[in-house]
Image (cartoon, helix red, strand yellow):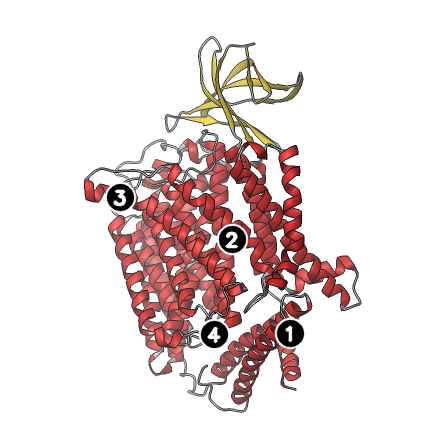
Amino acid sequence: MTAVVVALVVILCAVLAVAVAWPLLQREPEVDDPADRDAERRSLEDELHQSLSAIKEIAFDRDSGHLSEEDFAALDADERARAIELMRRRDRLASGGTESGA
Amino acid sequence: MSLLGRALLLLALLCALYAIGAALMSRRGGRRSLQLSAERAVYAMCGLVTAATLLMLFALVTDQFELRHVAEYSSSTLATKFKIGALWASQAGSLLLWAWIMSGYAALAVWLNRRRSRELMPVVTAVLMAIAAFFLFMLSFLSSPFETLGSTPAEGRGLNPLLQNEYMMAHPPLLYLGYVGLSIPFAFAIAALVTRRLDTQWIGHIRRWTVVSWLFLGIGILLGSRWAYHELGWGGYWAWDPVENAAFMPWLVATAFLHSVMVQERRGMLKVWNMVLVVLTFILALFGTFLTRSGIVASVHAFGESTLGPFFLGFILVALGGSLALLFTRLPELRSRHSLESYISREAVFLYNNLLLVGLAFAVFWGTIFPVITEAVQGEKITVGIGFYNQVAMPIGIALLVLTGVGPLIPWRKASGAQLLRRFATAGAIALASVPVLLLFTDAWQNFWAGVVFTACVFVVACIGGEFWRGTKVRHALGGVSWPGAAVQLVSRNRRRYGGYIVHLGVVLLFVGLAGSSAFTTQRDFALNTGQRGEVAGYTIVNEGFTRERDEHKGTVSVALGVFKDGERVTTLRPARDFYFASQQPSTEVALDSRPGRDLYAVLGGLDERGLARVSIFVNPLVMWLWIAGFVMFLGGLIAAWPGPRARRQEQESTSALTRAAR
C-alpha cells in the first residue's frame, strides 16, 4: 500500500512540475506583448466604466434633488475630467504608445 | 491514507512557496513566463489542498479511526452530515478548511485577473501565497489532520454534542469564507502600495470581494448566534464571548471600509484611511483566528490549549509591521485630491460612521484582550462583563442606526439648512408621529432606550422609503416605464446603492430584534410535577408528562409542556436532555415556539424518576426579526455585489458613453 502511495506521489510530483514549469519552457513573450497591452486596456476599461457610472450617478443625484446645481457642476466636471483622461490613456495605448500609469 | 494526505499538503506548501518566488521574480525584468508559471502553481496548490480535504472527508465518512482526527471527533454511529461537519471540529481540521478556502479564493482571484492588472498581480499572487504557505506550514509541521494513532481504536469518541447541530454545519464554513475572503482586499492593497499604483484601480478590484467577504462574515456571525440560541440553552444569542467578538471586530471595520471607500471613489479623499482599514480588517481576521486557536481566552467556541499561538502572533506582527512600514513610505503619494468642505456633507457623515464603527471595534478589542493584559501584568485574569460592552455598544449602535437613515439623504460636498429641512421634514414628522403610537400600542413606554431605538427605526425606514420613492419618481419621469417597472429599474441599474439601502433596512430589523429581545425578556424557573402548572408573562405552562427514548447513538428524556393563554392552547413545548454514548456527554435540547411577536423558549434543567421537571421558560420578544434581518441583509448584499452586464457589453457601453462625454 505504501509503495503504491509513494509511486502515486512521485507521478503527481512529475505532472505538477511539468505543468507549472511549462510556461518557462515556452518562448518568453515579447517585451511589447499584445497580451500585456490587452491587459492594460482591460484595466483602463474597468476604471473608465466606474468613472462613467459615477457620472450617471451624479446626474441621478441632481435629478432626485440630492445635489444643488453648483455642487453638481463641480462634481460632474471632476468626474468628466477623470473619464476624459482615462479615455486619452486608452487611446494612447490603442495607437501603440506606452501607458505609464496614473 | 495518512501518508498521502501529508504528501498532498507538503506538495501544496512547495507550490505556494514556488509561486511566491516566481511571482516576485517576474517583476524583475518583466518576465511574464514566470508569472504564468506562478499562476499555474496557485492552481496546482488549490488542486492539492482540495484533494487533501476530500481525502479527509473520505476518512471521516468511512470511519478511518487510525487517524487521530477521525478517532477523536467522529464515531461510526454519527450521522453522515455530522461526520462531514467533524472536519472543522478540531484545530487541525479547521486549519485544513481555512487552507482549502484560502486556496480556492487565491485561485479564483488569479483566474479572474489573468488578463488584467498585470502590474498588481505578481504582488497579489505573492501575498496570497504567503498567507496560504503559513497555514500549509502549520498543517504540515505543527498540527496535521493526518496524524495517526499508535493503535487503531474500534470506535471513535464521537463529536461534541454541542456541534451536532444543523447551524454548526453552516456557521464555521461561512465564517471562514468571510475571514479568508478578507485576504484578497489585503493582497490588492499591498500590491497597490508596492507598485505605487495608488489610483482607484485597486479599489475597483476589491470592492466586490470585500462585499462578498463581509456578507459571509455577517451571515456566519448571525448563524453562530442562532446556534448559541438553540444549543447553549441560556435563553440568549450573544454573550460578548471573546470568540464572538473576534468575528465581530473585522466585520465592523470592513463595514467602515465599505462606506469610506465611496468617499475615495467620489472625492479622492481618505486614501490613507482606506488603506489602514483594509490592513486592519485583515489583521483582525487573523487576530480572531489567533484567539480561537491560541488558548489565551476561555470560550465555548475556542479550541483550547495549543502550541500554535506564538506562530499566529508572529505572523500577525509581521503582516502588521510590514503593511504599516510600506504604507508609511507611500504617504506622500496618498494625498487626497480634495479636503472636507463641510461637517454637514455626505463625506462627513461617512467619516462619523467610520469613527463610530472603528471606535466600537476598538472598545470590543479592549474588552476582549483586557483579561489577557491583566493576567500578564497582575497575574490575575480580570474579565470584562457584558455590562461594559452593552454600555459602550448601545449609544454607538443608536448613533450608527440614525446615520444609516441620515447618510443617504445628505448631499456630497455640503448641505444648506434649507436642504436639510426639505430632506428630513417628512421622515422627521413620521418618526415624531410614531412616538404616541409606539407608547400606546406597544411596551415601548416601559423602557426609554428601547423606545428611542424603535423611534429611530421608524425614522430610518422613512428616510430609506423616501429615497426609493424619489428615485422611482425620477426613473418614471424619464418615460416608457410603469411605476413597478421604474422601481425594478431603479434597483437593477444602481445595484450597489439600492442594494446598500436594502442592507440598511436589514439593519433596522436587526435593531428591532435587538431592542425587543434585550429590553423585554421575561424568564421564570419552575419545578413542576406532572399535571402542575406555572405562570410566566401571561402564559400558563402545564407539565403534561415525560418520555424516555434511546437509540444506538444517544438516550433522550423530554417533558411535554402545554402552553396556554386565556384558556386556549398556544403550543406544546418539548424540551429535552440527551446523553451521547460515544462521547459520554450530556446535551440540552431547547424547545422553541417562534413567532414574529415573541419566542417561547423552554430549557429542561433536570427530570427526576417521579417526573418532577425543572424547567426554565423564557419569553423573548421580537427575536425572529434578528433572523429576518439576516435574510434581508443577505439579499441586499447580494444585490450590491451582483456583477453587472457581461464585460463585453460594458466595454461597448463605456466606449459609446465616452464618445458622448468627449463631445
Q: Which chain does the residue under circle 3 lie in?
A: B
Q: CA distance from mark 2 to mark 1?
A: 36 Å
Please, which residue is most extreme toward the top here?
A: B610
Q: Which chain does the residue under circle 4 lie in?
A: B
Do marks 1 and 3 both belong to one polypeptide chain?
Answer: no
Residue carrying label 3: B372
Q: Is residue B608 left or right of residue A45?
A: left
**Discs 2, 1 touching: Cβ within 8 Å:** no
Q: CA distance from mark 2 to mark 4?
A: 31 Å
Q: Nearer the viewer, mark 1 or mark 3?
A: 1
Give the residue type that dot 1 points to. Glu
Question: Does residue B37 appear anywhere in the picture?
Answer: no
User: Which disc, if any, is residue B178?
Assistant: none
Residue carrying label 1: A69
Do marks 2 and 3 both belong to one polypeptide chain?
Answer: yes
Q: Earlier in the sequence, mark 2 or mark 3?
A: 2
Residue carrying label 4: B338
Q: Nearer the viewer, mark 1 or mark 4?
A: 1
Q: Which chain does the residue under circle 1 lie in?
A: A
Q: Nearer the viewer, mark 3 or mark 4?
A: 4
Q: CA distance from mark 2 to mark 3?
A: 30 Å
Give the residue type that dot 4 points to. His
- What residue is shown at x 45% (from left), y 26% (from top)? B588
Using a 10 Å C-alpha cutoff, classify the residue at mark 2 as few (fewer than 14 neighbours), some (14 to 19) or many (20 or more).
many
**Discs 3, 4 touching: Cβ within 8 Å:** no
Q: Earlier in the sequence, mark 3 or mark 4?
A: 4
- What residue is shown at x 61% (from left), y 74% (from top)? A72
User: Which disc, if any, is residue B215?
Assistant: 2
Do marks 2 and 1 both belong to one polypeptide chain?
Answer: no
Q: Position of residue B308 (x, y in %)?
A: 27, 48
Do marks 2 and 4 both belong to one polypeptide chain?
Answer: yes
